[in-house]
Image: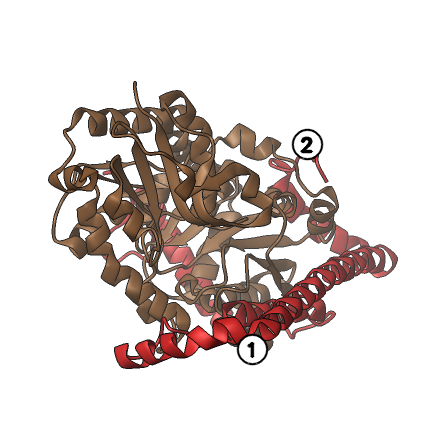
Chain colours: A red, B brown
Amino acid sequence: MAGDSSHTGDAFFSGPFDRDEVARLASAVDASLARHARATPAPAGGPHAPAAWSAVARARAALAVLEASSAPLFDASRGSPAARAVKRVLNLPLALLARPQRHFNAAARAALATCCDALDELARADAALRDALVVRDRRLAGPPEEREHAAPTRERGGARDREPSGGA
Amino acid sequence: MSGRVFQVVEHLRDGDGVSLVARRFVPLLAPLGGEGPILVRRADAAVRGETAPVDAVAWRADDVAVVHVSGHSALEPLVSRLPARVALYFHNITPPEFFGPGGGLAEYTRRGWAQLPRLARAADAWFAPSAYNLRALEAASGTTRPSHVIPPPCDPAAERAAPLDALRLAALRARGETNFLTVGRLAPNKRLERVMDAFDWYHGRIDRRSRLHLVGDATLDPDYVRRLLAHREALGARAAIEVTGKVSDETLHAHFAGAHVYLTLSEHEGFCLPPVVALAHDVPVFARAAAALPETLGEGAVLLHADDPPRTAEVVHAILADEGLRRRLVAAGRRALVRFAPATVAAAWAAALGALRATPRRAAAASRVG
């Protein structure tokens, strides 16, 4: 880090700010932390997290497990040296005789990968629909002050927000 | 400058950090003798066109092989017999302690660390994206080699002009929410559950109009992903935490363009490119001051010096709520990117390769000639 870092030994954070500013921010953070700790968090609301994304993660996790499997061969990279040696010997006939199983495994992997891709697309469509619903609901039911409340966030991004530059 | 330069990656993947770094180096190495194809043993279909089989090269004594290492490498036999000069490009290896005992990843990384001293000694020079990695290499191998820090390039103009998923970006902006972003494979060293905890505080007690997007491959560690998703379900903010899985480059760029905060609480990184890309998109970055992250981000980000999710959320809020501070943080991020300008990185490559070629091959290399 640069020599003029605002980090001091006991500071929680550092950054491109001078020490006085960090001290002021730290005090504000302490006060806000205490205030928010006393408050009850807002209840969770709105639609549940899109289930499709979880399904994608679970399906891809299953695919990863299948891809990492050495079946029908024994995994000769694991176990004690003796176990590895035994596995290497056992793998010799399996390499010749277990080809149908390997073909089956490859087909299973391909099928699961296809399912993952399909789930991925479904999840995207699901997310797009939810986004559209949120926008519609806000337009139909949101009070005017709610739209005003959203303004700071948009302003924050406004400096960076840009039109898509291509692709898609 | 004579001689060819080859990058060697055991498995070039579509979307992972190591592969991305190697691919970003290709145009910078071309004027220095770099051969276009990255040499591989395996490649994902999407990037196979950028590769050639490592066994297909007729090596010459004045060649340079830049061998990328990020775990246990099947390239060790090749490294030990190459007649060319060998530079190890060390991305670091996640300590096995982060993974469940007895699992494949723990074993893979443990074997990687065990192999590392041999690879390090067989190399003529060490390159890395951070000095942190070079120190780790020296500590692991108990020896030294001529070393150079060569970070991956990041051109803000190119990042911001990259094609993006316009629909995704529109969706990210349509809600009018503060978008938190974390990018990277879902791995335990990233401490994504702590990112969720920090966001849960922010969402539940500071600003309900917020959403956390965890973008990255979820296939590396299925057990961790299961725990992470279960953790999310226990949080009040669960409805506002999206785990996208691996996304296309266009969707990823949309996430960077639509983000208001980039937050990483990772405890082990050898460099970490995503927050650098976030800086290029003028996104304020908040990062745990761990491993190489302080070196990578320098004064361009807010560094967090303890594991305290609620306080992390409050710091994020304090800076986002003060437009002057936010702008200064973004400006500092832009200044921090100067070190990653393509011309700067190209100069680092030229210096490193020039020094390597000017040095007689080490005894190890000479013995490789046989």
Q: Which mark is residue B230?
A: 1
**Image mark 1: chain:** B
Kind of residue at disc 1: Ala
The C terminus of chain B sits in image quarter:
top left
Q: Is residue B321 visible?
A: no
Which residue corresponds to the image point at 69% horizontal and 50% vertical from the top-left? B172
Q: Which mark is residue B145?
A: none
Q: For residue A140, which quarter of the picture?
A: bottom right
Position of residue B252 measured from the top left corner of the image (x, y, whole percent): 60, 47
Position of residue B360 measured from the top left corner of the image (x, y, whole percent): 14, 29
SS category of the residue bearing label 1: helix
Residue ID for mark 2: A165
**Image mark 2: chain:** A
The answer to whether residue B358 is above or below residue B322 is above
**Mark 2: few, some, or many residues within 10 Å (few <14, many ≥20)?**
few
The answer to whether residue B196 is above or below residue B246 is below
Distance (Cα) linking label 1 and label 2 = 38 Å
Position of residue A129 measured from the top left corner of the image (x, y, whole percent): 81, 59
Which residue corresponds to the image point at 80% horizontal and 53% vertical from the top-left? A144
The answer to whether residue B325 is above or below residue B359 is below
